[in-house]
């Protein structure tokens, strides 16, 4: 999401009806970087396992999805734990 605008009263806006899996973290290196990240965090023996967990700020569940959270973000609420308070899906 690039920008959030204030909604107009009386208008209907889109909502998320379904989804799956968590979105990749920002700046993880695109599709290939995300796959490498998942490989590292799934394998405690991986040489970058601990480094990637620290970069993520703790555990990351790539299977997690919350339709309620996505709809809160679409409505303009910030994501929990977002230091900058800016909405993101």
Image (tube, rainbow, N blue to C red):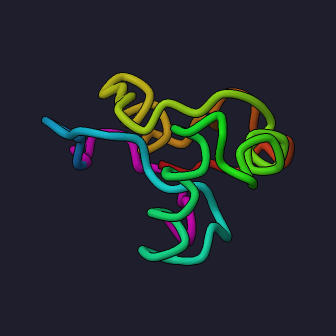
- Name the residue at the front extreme: 45
In this rendered view, identify the residue nearer to me: 34 or 18: 34
Please, what is the dominant secondary structure of the magenta stretch? loop
Residue 77 in the image: x percent, y percent?
A: 59, 35
Q: For this rendering, which residue is in front, 64 or 5?
A: 64
Examine the structure image and report whether residue 74 is included in the region drawn in magenta: no
Residue 11 in the magenta stretch? The answer is: yes
Q: Quadrant of residue 16?
A: top left
Determine which quarter of the picture holds residue 43: top right
Question: Would residue 5 be visible to someone looking at this image?
Answer: yes
Total marks placed: 0
**Residue 48, image x, y percentages:** 74, 54
At 50% from the left and 50% from the top, the residue drawn is 38
Q: Nearer the viewer, residue 71 or 47?
A: 47
Which residues, given as a range, are shown in magenta? 1-13
Above or below for 3 versus 22: below
Q: Using the rendered view, name the quadrant where residue 71 is placed.
A: top left
Residue at the image position 80 percent from the left and 37 percent from the top: 57
Q: Percent x, y for residue 85?
A: 78, 43
Picture residue at 14% right of the left edge, 36% below the top: 18
- Residue 7's x, y, as percent? 44, 49
Q: Is residue 6 in view?
A: no
């Amino acid at each position: 999401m690039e920008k959030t605008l204030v909604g107009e009263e009386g208008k209907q806006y889109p909502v998320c009806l379904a989804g799956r899996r968590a979105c990749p973290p920002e700046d993880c290196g695109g599709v290939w970087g995300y796959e490498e990240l998942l490989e590292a965090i799934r394998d405690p023996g991986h040489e970058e396992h601990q480094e990637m967990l620290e970069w993520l700020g703790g555990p990351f569940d790539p299977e997690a999805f919350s339709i309620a959270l996505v709809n809160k973000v679409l409505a303009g609420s910030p994501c929990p734990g977002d230091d900058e308070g800016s909405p993101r899906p």
